[in-house]
Image (cartoon, rainbow, N blue to C red):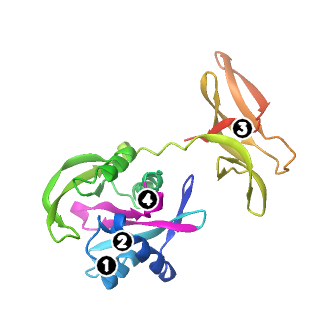
Amino acid sequence: MKLVGDRIVLRRVTAADLPTLIAILREPAVAARWSAPDDEGDRALLAGEDGDGAERITTWAITLDGAIVGWIAGWEKLEPDYRHAGIDLFVATDHHRKGIGPEAIALVCRHLFEQAGHHRITIDPAADNVAAIRAYEKVGFRAVGVLRRYERGADGTFHDGLLMDLLPEDLELPRSPAGPLRIVPARGSLRWAIGDRVLDGSEIVELCCSGGWLTGRFEWNGTVDARPTFHFSVERGGADVAPHTIPIPEGAILRRAQ
């Protein structure tokens, strides 16, 4: 099972992924927010093993351009009266503060709501982990309350946690970054991209213009010499809508539509 986002792809963790994931987990900035190193226990966690069977755990490798840049898990409490889900994750230090975490969280939350049928998702960062809390808030999580002396950290002391939860109506999908339209080598040929994000031959985008953002369809026939076009409609009053098609110049600012 793969979950595909604007920039990242989440795929199920395999045994071959574990050395790379362990290496990321041992990075100082990541390890500082995780439990004390335990190779056997960490491998079991990363693989999604649940010793007592009280939860169903699904783990994904977070990949960017095919490379593993982090890990995320969706765990599910299955007792009917208290059924809900939760998320844990980490991202490689080089990819902190680049929007990778919120995009991965949004993908897993949508899966847990729409495919697994949950009505509530929780997450419990350290109360002093301001960057993580802000990332979760971007997706729609709300603070419920402080969990005092909740979790033992790598230094051996217990610190406070923050319980946050998310309902389906709270979920906010991160806005796709804007960038210039340009030609990049990809998939064995030259293709049009927004910044470094390769576009398919036809997809909904937003074009930056003097009046703001205009939503329409990006179209390209796959020939490098052919100029991509932007197809949109303008209301002329009442139910009358006029379709328009314009060429998109290289360097125009675009972003994928929500």
Residue on which the image places disc 1: 50
- Residue 145: give x, y in percent of width and height: 17, 49
Residue underneath mark 4: 108
Distance from disc 4 to disc 2, alpha carbons, whole Å, reads: 12 Å
Mark 2, secondary structure of its residue: strand
| Boundaries of the magenta span | 67-96
Question: Which residue carries the number 3 mark?
Answer: 251
Kindly identify which numbered label has been placed on residue 58: none
Of label 1 and label 2, which has the lower sequence position? 1
Q: Amino acid at mark 3?
A: Gly
Quarter of image, res 32: bottom left
Q: Secondary structure at mark 1?
A: loop
Q: What secondary structure is marked by label 4? A: helix
Q: Which residue is mark 2?
A: 57
Q: Are marks 1 and 2 in contact (CB under 8 Å)?
A: yes
Instruction: Check if mark 4's residue and mark 3's residue have beta carbons within 8 Å.
Output: no
Find the residue positioned furthest to the top: 237
Amino acid residing under circle 2: Ile
The foreground one among 115 and 44 is 44
